[in-house]
Image (tube, rainbow, N blue to C red):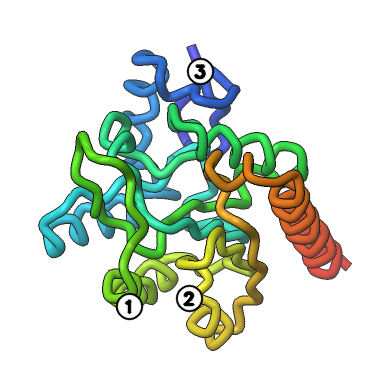
Amino acid sequence: MTDQSADTHRVLPQVSHPKALRDPGELAWRRTLVEGDHVRSLTRYARDLATRMGSPVPLADPLDGGVTARLLILLETPGPRMLTTGFVSRDNPTGTAANLYRFLDRAGIARGDTVIWNIVPWLIQVPGTPNRNPTRAQVAEGLLHLPEFLDLLPNLELAVTAGRKAEAARDLLEARDIPCLAMPHPSPTYVCTSPDVARRIAACLETAAERLAARRLDVTR
């Protein structure tokens, strides 16, 4: 049995592959980790925000870095299928999550260095209807809440915005001295439109990996 004591963000998943959270056992195990030291404050923030907004807010994945994260991956908004897991995760059983898993893995970015969130973190979709993009007003409202989330990430060094809606956070992030890179959204809808989309995502994350590595080298000198 995997040791779940001490630093839970260093615990390896029982299943490590895209869409791992479709496995009920893996999902149940993941849910036991949401009060770990590295994610407790993020869990409580998400639950408080859900109460304030009157809409579900998926939790940060406890297998990611949590408050120790150096890289923020900022997506747009949760899809209704995230209600089946309750997490913002590269392991969700969706095409977007599976793409993100593969791109991050190929870039060689350590999972413990990352935290994944949405610029509009609460559910705006109506279950049973097609996904829709957040409106300009919803993005503006999401930006009002983003500083509270960033305040919980003292080690953040870099952000990657995924999609045009998420890119609206650039000014806010850079005002906090958090450099920002932009990439296309990893949804299959976009990735399948042109080989250039996948190349741009890969190039962005490779640059992010290089910057994190260079920063770590500077710190250790």
Residue at numbered disc 1: 140
The residue closer to the viewer here, 26 or 171, is 171
Label 2: how many residues lie within 10 Å, few (<14), some (14-19) or many (20+)?
some
The residue closer to the viewer here, 96 or 40, is 96
Quadrant assignment, res 45: bottom left
Residue 51 is left or right of residue 214, and the answer is left
SS class of the residue under badge 2?
Answer: helix
Quadrant assignment, res 28: top left
Question: Contact (CB < 8 A) between labels 2 and 3?
Answer: no
Instruction: Identify which amino acid the numbered label 1 is placed on.
Output: Ala
Sequence-first disc among 1 and 2:
1
Decide if residue 171 is in sight here.
yes
Question: Contact (CB < 8 A) between labels 3 and 1?
Answer: no
Residue at numbered disc 2: 168
| 3D distance between C-alphas at marks 3 and 1 | 42 Å
**Between marks 2 and 3 in the image, the one whose residue lies nearer the viewer:** 2
Residue at numbered disc 3: 2
Q: Residue 44 in the image: state x and y as whole percent.
A: 25, 54
SS class of the residue under badge 3?
Answer: loop
